[in-house]
Image (tube, helix red, strand yellow):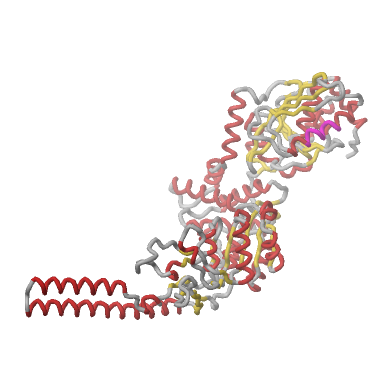
Amino acid sequence: MGDDEKIKREALAPREYGESLELGIEFTTTEEIEVPEKLIDQVIGQEHAVEVIKTAANQKRHVLLIGEPGTGKSMLGQAMAELLPTETLEDILVFPNPEDENMPRIKTVPACQGRRIVEKYREKAKSQESVKSYILLFVMFTVMLALFIEFSATTLLMGLFVVILTIMALSNMRLKSTVLVPKLLVDNCGRTKAPFIDATGAHAGALLGDVRHDPFQSGGLGTPAHERVEPGMIHRAHKGVLFIDEIATLSLKMQQSLLTAMQEKKFPITGQSEMSSGAMVRTEPVPCDFVLVAAGNLDTVDKMHPALRSRIRGYGYEVYMRTTMPDTIENRRKLVQFVAQEVKRDGKIPHFTKEAVEEIVREAQKRAGRKGHLTLRLRDLGGIVRAAGDIAVKKGKKYVEREDVIEAVKMAKPLEKQLADWYIERKKEYQVIKTEGSEIGRVNGLAVIGEQSGIVLPIEAVVAPAASKEEGKIIVTGKLGEIAKEAVQNVSAIIKRYKGEDISRYDIHVQFLQTYEGVEGDSASISVATAVISALEEIPIRQDVAMTGSLSVRGEVLPIGGATPKIEAAIEAGIKTVIIPKSNEKDVFLSKDKAEKIQIFPVETIDEVLEIALEESEKKRELLRRIRETLPLSL
């Protein structure tokens, strides 16, 4: 009993967020917060990436941004476009080639001159069209004069024949001025900053340029080749920034073409479809001197064309985007600026009170998942800002208040959280999740769906005589990933060590109940170990206890991710006690009402887990004595 009292005294008091926060700036509402004009100054928490972008813009270097969605990659690309010089912008025109109509000529001129050149040629074309009109009017006047002098059927028929012949001749005439009217491919007139082109998900024609199909290719009805040329995004990004998110989704052929364009700084336009008449047309090389800002996650690095990545690395920079920043007064001040920016950018929601901003900062602390940090997944945080603003508008409020933010967090739950709530409700209804009494070999584990949604994961273990005379096996059922399977194997090392006898005579069956969604990671290790030890020793496990933690082969409880959402899932399921790794104790961040519903015990070793989870008995005390004697638990 003395041991249990000791454990209760060590129960964790989780960080609550009901009290006031120091934001490092005095204000009443975000109306008073000044929002920087330049995009680069609006980037929050990515100081290293900002410095790289400034250097890259100054030297015109390519950049590869690797990180999770919503951390500011596209915003950095747009900010880079602001930093590039605009005085060198050019217009690109395509002219017909009298020597080879299937190879139109390309010409670049300073910005705004392209329009004047096209207009000049159009005026010439109009003057030639007027000549046609004069000729037709003259012929018609001559015919009418002839009919006036001598009206007869023969004269009328001859006159009609001459008029029709003249119209046909004029329609088939190819006057030089008509053919020579150029097409303005890229028009940068009026731009105050370098172009920023988002080519995410673009197909080959949109990215590299294309030549439209001409259904009328003969009889004077065809469209000249140069008029069918369409610029690609690489050409429209000339002297600017080409941004491609998830660059690895481009085919290797497109990545190779992109590499060629980066190396040569020009790329010819041709028809992308072999079935189109445009495939016969290939222009002279079109300028495409752009700065590439490519983005993606860690998988992108493996799937990128090696030569393309080498080009970026050799002639630019690679940057990993941070997902959290230290929870300092300075960084809290930046989050205040972030809220003001989101309100201004949205334009449809009211400003936030100081208390509402404090609630946003608390949510940033919670979503960071790390002690002393704030999340930098600002797109998700911006979603809460907008949802809170919508709620305030619906209520007819002048400003967004704290309760609106709290309501927004509940209302704007991600899909994974909604699924987790449904999962817990359904499993409790059918008694798959038990929160009362005690059972042998059954434990409530904890897992996460997505990033911020926890679920209770019931696990059962049964020990049976080995089916094989040669060895016993650990048989695991449930949709487990590779890491989860390996974690279960690690548990067997601890069991063999403390048991002190040959367990090859047993088959140990472990079942993850109704895990149709799949299980990955090793955070269920202590749950599996507890269930198996309970089954071997026939000691019941308290069903009002849930647990999460990785386990080493030495019996040490190692840190896991998603501590807070896992504990929240346990609270929603009606569980009273949660066991977590000692390393994660400062990662727990609960609201005051939730903190009052749960006891949290941080542990360092497997014997501490068993001491809390197993029902009190003589068997339990003997088991703990053996484990402490045999396992190297000198922590």
Measuring from the top left, give residue 605's x and y in whole percent: 83, 35
Number of residue marks: 0
- The prevailing secondary structure element of the residues shown in magenta is helix
- Residue 296 visible within the image: yes
The answer to whether residue 26 shows anywhere in this view is no
Frontmost residue, 302 versus 621: 302
Vertical placement of residue 205 versus 541, above or below: below
Q: Which residue is drawn at 43% across and 48% down?
A: 396
Q: Position of residue 402 (x, y in %)?
A: 55, 47
Q: Residue drawn at (61%, 25%), measured in percent from left and top? A: 428
Magenta stretch contains residue 492: yes
Q: Is residue 205 magenta?
A: no
The magenta segment is 486-493
Residues 145 and 465: in front is 145
Q: Is residue 276 left or right of residue 255?
A: left
Above or below — where is 572 with respect to 280? above
Q: Is residue 536 above or below residue 245?
A: above
Where residue 275 sits in the image (x, y, percent)?
A: 48, 57
Q: From this viewpoint, which residue is outermost toward the front?
A: 154
Q: Which of 576 and 539 is in front in this view?
A: 539
Instruction: Tell me the quarter of the image containing the C terminus.
Output: top right
Quarter of the picture containing the N terminus is: top right
Q: In the image, is 444 to the left or to the right of 99?
A: right
- At a point 82% along the width and 35% down the height, the residue shown is 490
Eyeballing the image, is 402 above or below 44?
above
Spot occupied by residue 14 in the image (x, y as percentages of width and height)? 71, 40
